[in-house]
Image (cartoon, helix red, strand yellow):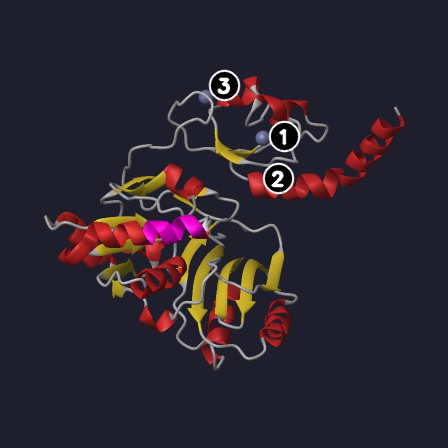
Amino acid sequence: MPSRNQFQILAYYRFTPIADPHAEVANHKQFCEGKDILARVYISEMGINGQMSASQKDAAEYIAWMEQHPLFKGVEFKVQPYHEHVFPRLTIKYRKQLVALDSEVDLTQGGEYVTPQQWKELLDGDEEYVLLDVRNDYEWKVGRFKGAELPPCENFREFQQFAEDLKSKIGKKKTPVLMYCTGGIRCEVYSAFLKARGIENIMQLHGGIIKYGEDVGSDHWQGKLFVFDDRLTVPVSNGETEMIGTCHHCGTNVEAYYNCANMKCNYLFLCCPACLKAHEGCCKTECAQSDRLRPYHQQNPHKPFRKWYHYFQEHSKELKDKRQNDQKD
Ligand SMILES: [Zn+2]
Ligand SMILES: [Zn+2]
């Protein structure tokens, strides 16, 4: 009988100097060609950041291949079984920055690694700490550690200001700063940035929320984990958690994300079924007037990214014809 979980979802990264990242992109492409692998892999002069879904066989082959690779030996893979692919295609690309930050940071001077078990103990304890979530706001909105703050990571100037304010708030107390993200890569960069600005006592959750869920469970966590693939939001573990996401329109508790039906907007927002229908899949009234509107009922709450992609594939000609006709009118 075929297993229900015939695929593996891999998440991994490594910061290491890569002399010729374009050659490494080609090398990766060559390996993946003809295999049952879909992915988003980014390679820069500074390292690799990858997410992948693959058949069990090809996932094992990829991991073994990476282990033989002089640059990637010993990379830690977070592996989750799943019943289907979660990426729309195989994307392996050069990207200048693996984590967007408009500043040079010394990645060897990041925060101290904390295992998921140690992380739980820190959160269990009575000692004072500052808890920072360095992901995007839409990730934070649907799930986070209780009491976590969301620094303005998307705006570098604001983040610099945040770092200065944090430093004066902490002062001489050396209050520990606990930092986490989905899989750990963002913490490497943001913890190094904060340390360079004089915040000394930083601890980063090693392996991120993914590893924490696997090793510890859902203690201190609320809501769901946002992931950048077709699953969109997933439980951190089998444990129960309270829902914290709220509908963008009416505030009801929800955990389903949609991309705005206006393709020119495409804003990602949490929405309840009633509001989705009432606003025809749009994030705001103006969007419903757009000339590039996806029919709202075509959106699949579980796969907005893929739907969006397929929608363009299937309807791009139709949309082009429609636009040309509109222009004639
Ligand atoms: Zn609503
Ligand atoms: Zn919109």
Left or right: 176 with respect to 223?
left
Mark 2 crowdedness (10 Å alpha carbons): few <14, some 14-19, many ≥20: some
Q: What residue type is labelled 3?
A: Ala
Q: How far apart are marks 3 and 2 (CA)?
A: 20 Å
Label 1, residues with CA under 10 Å away: few <14, some 14-19, many ≥20: few
Q: In the rendered structure, which disc, 1 or 2, sits on the residue that comes first in sequence? A: 1
Q: What residue type is labelled 2?
A: Lys
Q: Mark 1 points at which residue?
A: 298
Determine whether the beta carbon of the residue marked 3 sits less than 8 angstroms from the nearest atom of ligand 1.
yes
**At label 1, which amino acid type do we have?**
Gln
Q: Do the residues labelled 1 and 2 touch (CB within 8 Å)?
A: yes
Q: Which residue is drawn at 51% across and 58% down?
A: 52
Q: Which numbered tag is attached to residue 307?
A: 2
Position of residue 154 in the picture relative to residue 22 (left or right): left
Question: Residue 111: x and y, percent?
Answer: 28, 64
Q: Distance between the residues labelled 1 and 2?
A: 8 Å
- Please name the residue that numbered disc 3 is placed on: 274
Span colored in magenta: 157-163
Is 178 located above or below residue 269 in the figure? below
Q: In this view, does 250 lie above or below 198?
A: above
Dividing the picture into quarters, in which one does residue 93 lie? bottom right
Q: Nearer the viewer, residue 236 or 104?
A: 104
SS assignment at label 2: helix
